[in-house]
Amino acid sequence: MKDKDAIKKAVREGYAGIAKQEHSSCCESAGSCCESGNTARTISSRIGYTEEQLGAVTEGANLGLGCGNPVALSSLEPGQVVLDLGSGAGIDCFLAARKVGSEGRVIGIDMTPEMIERARENARKGGYENVEFRLGEIENLPVADQSCDRILSNCVINLSPDKERVFREVFRVLRPGGRFMISDVVLLKELPDFIRNSIKAYIGCLSGAVMKNQYIRIIREAGFQDVRIVHETPFPIECMANDPTAKAVLENPEITPEQYGSIAGTAVSIQVSGVKRETL
């Protein structure tokens, strides 16, 4: 296991570069990034966002970084408080804001200052008065205990080197009866060493991912009930190769065709939900 601080630093720097360059990574599901020239809008439409949703958010809020659409399955209601882990440029926060209305509130958390700055500017441009963005780590959420009704996250928790702590924090800030809906990348088989030991692959949603059964176990051990995978989609090797950060690893001339082929069928994108039960 690489040093956790080194991983966080590398991930922060990687996504700071994405925020500055207006260039999307490609942490998406089957068919979403397997063709050249895809825009963020095209990518997002293929992972579950509707044209109406994409047309409703501020330009620049969608970087095409997700692996699903957690808002679509989150059952948001007017007046709720929603928390988005790893909010990026703000697309899921802005979509959630439309559902919770003026009496509700949406909080986006991101550890990259450049992303927070971009998201806040997008909120100003879009007139989202019920959305705020806070700088912080998902392992140490700057949010009060039992203060949120719903929690969303889109292809972010796989980047954390301490997923157990992340889900303990999710449990802490959810109110009893609260629910999360998370899109993420998990593994069906172990990654080969040349991927697992790569910081660049970590940024690209590869080497940070864990086995699917381990991911679900972590959630349950944090205290959640009714944990279920709502949707699961293959994450093919072509998408991995098209990820700008993973591409640098896979194009290494020292990597053989056999090693490259060993990645096929390794990862899937899942949408998983769980509930913090009411206390007796």
Image: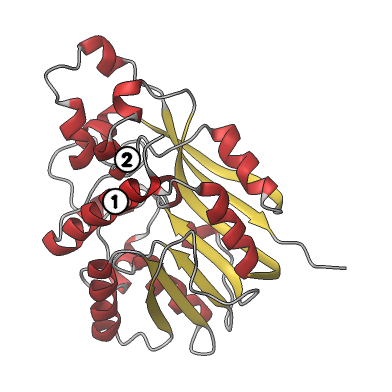
Q: Is residue 161 above or below residue 92?
A: above
Given the image, on which type of amino acid does mark 2 rest? Tyr
- Where in the figure is residue 276, as x and y percent of width and height? 71, 61
Residue 96's tag is none
Q: Is residue 105 above or below residue 227?
A: below
Q: Is residue 208 above or below residue 275?
A: above
Which quadrant would the C terminus be assigned to in this image?
A: bottom right
- Where in the figure is residue 91, as x and y percent of width and height? 34, 67
Q: Is residue 248 above or below residue 52?
A: above
Q: From where the camera sits, is residue 211 visible?
A: yes
Given the image, on which type of amino acid does mark 1 rest? Val
Q: Secondary structure at mark 2?
A: helix
- The residue sitting at 48% across, 35% down in the picture is 210
Q: From where the camera sits, is residue 58 visible?
A: no
- Residue 82 versus residue 114: which sits nearer the camera? 114
- Residue 94 versus residue 251: which sits nearer the camera? 251
Of labels 2 and 1, earlier in sequence is 1
Disc 2: which residue: 202
Based on the displayed image, in which of its 4 quarters is residue 121 positioned? bottom left
Disc 1: which residue: 11
Chosen colour scheme:
secondary structure
Extreme residue in the top direction: 258
How many other residues sit within 10 Å of disc 2, few (<14), some (14-19) or many (≥20)? many
- Residue 221 versus residue 236: which sits nearer the camera? 221
- Where in the figure is residue 153, as x and y percent of width and height? 46, 58
Q: Secondary structure at mark 1?
A: helix
- The residue sitting at 45% across, 23% down in the picture is 190
- Where in the figure is residue 13, as x and y percent of width and height? 22, 55
- The residue sitting at 40% across, 66% down in the picture is 92
